[in-house]
């Protein structure tokens, strides 16, 4: 598996991110959707990666710099056909390693509730993430679960 910095506007990545956004809007009211569109993923404070096997997209994820010591995981997604094959864990491990390399002391994320995002909760918990309160610009929201990892 190759994990490399990529352009979120690349056609296959763009399609996966559009699927991700559609799914988020199906599960949550608009004010509770915190997934980023492609234009926001191109901001300078965000690094975006894709994971590929033999050139085929199997996942993606991004790291947003919140400040000099705190990062946020964004846009973690695996195509339906590639789930449960280790791509999500590989991308997560890559982002955690990059956060450590940058000298962050904390890495956080926002995801949906366990009823609909159970696999994501299990993945993050298995990597050591713990539930926490809102961080950054987030507010309490019944459609959001916040998790953090002390690095």
Image (cartoon, rainbow, N blue to C red):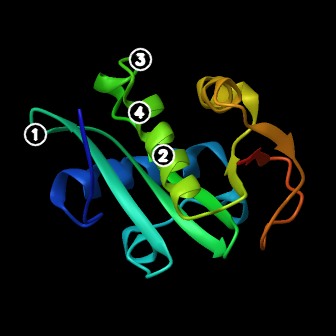
In this rendering, position of residue 83 left or right of residue 151: left
Q: Nearer the viewer, residue 16 or 129?
A: 129
Q: To which residue does mark 2 refer? A: 76
Query: Vertical placement of 130 versus 80: above or below?
Result: below
Name which residue lies at 37% across and 69% down.
38
Name which residue lies at 27% across and 58% down.
14
Mark identifier at residue 100: none
Helix, strand or loop at label 3? It is loop
* Picture coordinates of residue 20, whole percent (x, y): 44, 48
The residue lying furthest to the bottom in this view is 44
Query: Vertical placement of 32 versus 41: above or below?
Result: above
Q: To which residue does mark 4 refer? A: 90
Name which residue lies at 61% across and 63% down.
103
In this rendering, position of residue 99 left or right of residue 112: left
Q: To which residue does mark 3 refer? A: 84
N-term mark: 2 or 4 = 2
* Picture coordinates of residue 7, whole percent (x, y): 25, 66
Q: Quadrant of residue 41?
A: bottom left
Quarter of the figure that contains the N terminus: top left
N-term mark: 3 or 1 = 1
Q: Nearer the viewer, mark 1 or mark 4?
A: 4
Helix, strand or loop at label 4? It is helix
Packing grade of label 4 (10 A; few <14, some 14-19, many >=20) is some
* Picture coordinates of residue 92, whole percent (x, y): 50, 40
* Picture coordinates of residue 15, whole percent (x, y): 27, 52
């Amino acid at each position: 598996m190759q994990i490399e910095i990529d352009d979120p506007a690349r056609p296959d990545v763009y399609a996966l991110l559009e699927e991700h956004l559609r799914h988020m809007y199906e599960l949550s009211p608009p004010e509770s959707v915190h997934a980023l569109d492609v234009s926001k993923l191109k901001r300078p404070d965000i690094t975006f990666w894709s994971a590929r096997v033999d050139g085929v997209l199997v996942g993606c994820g991004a790291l947003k710099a919140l400040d000099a010591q705190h990062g946020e995981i964004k846009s973690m997604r695996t195509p339906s056909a590639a789930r449960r094959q280790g791509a999500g864990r590989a991308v997560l491990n890559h982002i955690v390693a990059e956060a450590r390399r940058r000298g962050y002391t904390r890495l956080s994320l926002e995801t949906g509730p366990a009823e609909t995002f159970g696999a994501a909760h299990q993945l993050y918990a298995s990597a050591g993430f713990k539930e926490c309160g809102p961080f950054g610009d987030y507010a309490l929201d019944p459609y959001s679960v916040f998790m953090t990892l002390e690095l």
